[in-house]
Image: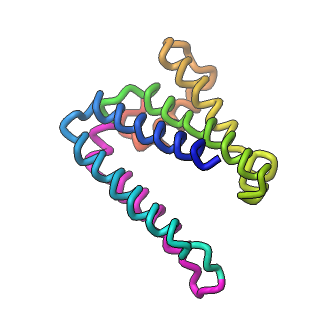
């Protein structure tokens, strides 16, 4: 099961680097270095067992959540991501969100094995599998030039991806 999760992570990271390679080639080394640092730091922390200590106050996992949230805000506001989003076609960004489909399948398997709470899978309260599957369908439709039935949905996608200044 661990190798399946690692495969999804590797494919997701590889997809991100492929996007950077295609649309912002000078930033590939920085993006790869950032991913590597992220994997090393969080891999070391998680394998140390520190994150399993829920008796500590505050729980160490809270720092992971805060760093993921802070890192996401920082990355979203960075000139690197703004350049990437400005150059990449919308369908490629939407397609990238398709990583959620295989991730949710692996998470369901983990819940079935008892490794993860069932509430975090689509058997419980997590329906990100719908997001992943619909992202793939919407990306294909965008790539083929099919008009979307509801133009305001396209605007919402663009705004949520930080492309609000490019909304048509």
Side of 168 relative to 56 (left or right): left
Q: Where the C terminus falls, by quadrant?
A: top left
Which color mode does the image show?
rainbow
> Which quadrant of the figure has residue 92?
top left
Location of residue 160 in the rendering, given as x and y in whole percent from the top left corner: 49, 43
- Left or right? Give the position of 98 relative to 33: right
Q: How many marks?
A: 0
- Give the quarter of the image for residue 127: top right
The residue located at (22%, 41%) in the rendering is 27
Depth check: give the residue in front, 159 or 143. 143
| Magenta-span inclusion, residue 73 | yes
Quarter of the image for residue 88 reads top left
* Residue 89 in the image, given as x and y percentages of width and height: 38, 26
Q: Position of residue 163 (x, y in %)?
A: 40, 39
The stretch of residues the image draws in magenta is 55-84
User: Who's the residue at 27% across and 46% down the image?
Assistant: 80
Residue at the spot 36% in from the left edge and 53% down from the top edge: 75
From what the image shows, is residue 146 above or below residue 89?
Answer: above
Q: Residue at x 77, y 57 (%)?
A: 114
Closer-to-camera residue (99/134): 99
The answer to whether residue 71 is above or below residue 93 is: below
Q: Position of residue 86 (x, y in %)?
A: 31, 34
Answer whether residue 64 is magenta in the image: yes
In the image, 42: left or right of 121?
left
Magenta stretch: dominant SS? helix
- In front of the other: 130 or 116: 116
């Amino acid at each position: 099961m661990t190798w399946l999760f690692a495969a999804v992570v590797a494919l997701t990271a590889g997809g991100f680097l492929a996007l950077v390679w295609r649309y912002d080639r000078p930033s590939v080394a920085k993006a790869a270095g950032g991913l590597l640092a992220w994997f090393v730091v969080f891999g070391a922390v998680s394998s140390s067992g520190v994150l399993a200590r829920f008796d500590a106050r505050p729980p160490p996992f809270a720092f992971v959540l805060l760093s993921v949230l802070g890192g996401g805000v920082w990355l979203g506001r960075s000139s690197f991501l703004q350049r990437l989003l400005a150059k990449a076609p919308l369908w490629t960004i939407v397609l990238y969100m398709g990583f959620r489909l295989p991730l949710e399948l692996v998470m369901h398997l983990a819940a079935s094995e008892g490794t993860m709470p069932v509430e975090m899978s689509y058997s419980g309260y997590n329906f990100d599998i719908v997001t992943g599957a619909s992202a793939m369908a919407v990306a294909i439709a965008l790539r083929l030039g099919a008009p979307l039935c509801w133009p305001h949905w396209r605007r919402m996608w663009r705004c949520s991806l930080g492309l609000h200044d490019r909304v048509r």
